[in-house]
Amino acid sequence: MPKYVIPVTYMMYSKYTIDAPTLVDALDKVQGLPLPEDAVYLDESVNIIEEDVMESNDLSDDDCRVLSDWLAEDYRQRND
């Protein structure tokens, strides 16, 4: 059975409380901090990017069409 690498992105939500002299300093500090333990996954935020899947696999032309069709149908279902 073939194996496929399917890169995904998803979103999480949380808040940081940052001590800083200015807003810009607070924004700078938050960059690169680890995800807080109370972070929650945002439902239905999983995203599959066609180019990422294609770059991560050696797909045939038929597989590329299947991927495009699947992503288009997934998009339609999420946005109806």
Image (spheres, rainbow, N blue to C red):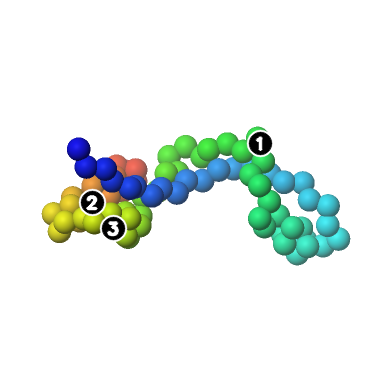
Q: Which residue is mark 1?
A: 37
Where residue 40 appears, as percent x and y from the top left, is 58, 36
Q: Is residue 76 visible?
A: no
CA–CA distance between discs 2 and 3? 9 Å
Is 13 positioned to the left or the right of 20 in the image?
Answer: left
Q: Which residue is mark 2?
A: 67
Where residue 78 appears, as percent x and y from the top left, is 34, 43
Q: Amino acid at mark 3?
A: Met
Q: Residues within 10 Å of mark 2 (few under 14, many from 20)?
A: some
**Residue ID at (72%, 62%):** 28
- Foreground residue among 79 and 37: 37
Q: Quadrant of residue 54?
A: bottom left
Q: Residues within 10 Å of mark 3 (few under 14, many from 20)?
A: some
**Residue ID at (77%, 46%):** 17
CA–CA distance between discs 1 and 3? 33 Å
Q: Amino acid at mark 1?
A: Glu
Q: Earlier in the sequence, mark 2 or mark 3?
A: 3
